[in-house]
Image (tube, helix red, strand yellow):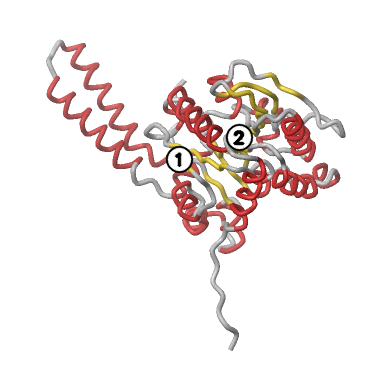
Amino acid sequence: MKAPLLEFEKPIAELEHKLEDLKKHSKQQDIDFSPEVLQMQEKLESTRREIYSNLTAWQRVQIARHTARPYFLDYVAAFCADFVELHGDRLFGDDLSMPAGMGTIGGRRCVIIGQQKGRDTKENVLRNFGSPHPEGYRKALRLMRLAEKFSLPVVCFIDTPGAYPGIGAEERHIAEAIAVNLREMMLLRTPIVAVVIGEGGSGGALGIGVADSVLMMENAYYSVISPEGCAAILWKHRKHAPEAAEALKLNAGELLKLGVIDEVIPEPMGGAHHDTAESASRLQSALVSALEKICSQKIETLLESRYNKFRKVGVFAEEPVL
């Protein structure tokens, strides 16, 4: 099944359609159109490079939300064949938008936690559209403490528009659950790697994002608020989301410059959904490298580095009051 087109990809689709027509016509009429086909292929590749190498912040947000983009469990299936899911927070229930368990990445046994969206309406309802409930964060913390007990590194996959804001989540203290995770992850005596694979929305993302090494896929985004939410506050209309996306500096390149993340993982041209196998391979290599680096450090050094890393996040200037 072909991935749905984004608006800015239409020129590429038109050229692909023309190329297919040209090849079909050549075959039906038994006429050699090789020079024309070659010229069309070159134009197609040139158009792809031009569009995908000059993506705006808003266009990258659209790619991060693409319904064909690989999700957490897709990556786990690709390079962690022995993954065993564990369920429940031992307090309220099991949150299916936050699958978690144990598996092996690059020969290293890990506790693996991630946020999972759905591909269709039925699956999205099951996964709560990738927006975790309080019990999801408490389950994540339960497994992190298990990792600490058995000296296993923790790997977190971030992909959420934000934590669930409904009445039930408020009744079960969603803010408190995220706040506790922030505190406990900062003090957790085991290595932690977090990777933003799609959407990294607000506290919902940060609830499993305090890590020794924070990685990010090239076309993912990581932000305190969605572009639409920011536009609604500042410009009073969602139509200004593209301007908000630029202002928020939410893309991987910008966040690397600001020191919010430690590494950008390149994606195949057009986004991870154009070549899931290659994307999984690149992600696996980045995770293995990050784990090797942090797992070789003494835990006291790691905790101090983790604390300093997040203390340094944020750029500000002070001016004397006249």
Residue bearing the label numbered 1: 218
- Decide if residue 37 is on the left or right side of residue 152: left
- Decide if residue 255 is on the left or right side of residue 142: left
Instruction: Give the x, y percent position of residue 11.
Output: 32, 37
Q: CA distance from mark 2 to mark 1?
A: 14 Å
Question: In the image, what residue occupies the spot 61% across and 25% down?
Answer: 73
Type of amino acid under label 1: Glu
Query: Which quarter of the figure is the C terminus placed in?
Result: bottom right
- Decide if residue 43 is on the left or right side of residue 239: left
Evaluate if marks 2 and 1 touch, with contact meaning CB atoms under 8 Å apart. Answer: no
Instruction: Give the x, y percent position of residue 216.
Output: 51, 41
Instruction: Give the x, y percent position of residue 199.
Output: 57, 41
Nearer to us in this view, 68 or 183 = 183
Instruction: Note whether 267 is above or below 253 in the view shown.
Output: above
Question: In the image, what residue occupies the spot 46% across and 25% down?
Answer: 281
The reply to whether residue 224 is in sight is no
Q: Which mark is residue 157?
A: 2
Secondary structure of the residue carrying tag 2 is strand
Instruction: Note whether 117 is above or below 109 in the view shown.
Output: below
Number of other residues with Cα within 10 Å of mark 1, as a class: few under 14, some 14 to 19, many 20 or more: many
> In terms of image quadrants, where is residue 97?
top right
Question: In the image, what residue occupies the spot 30% across and 28% down?
Answer: 16
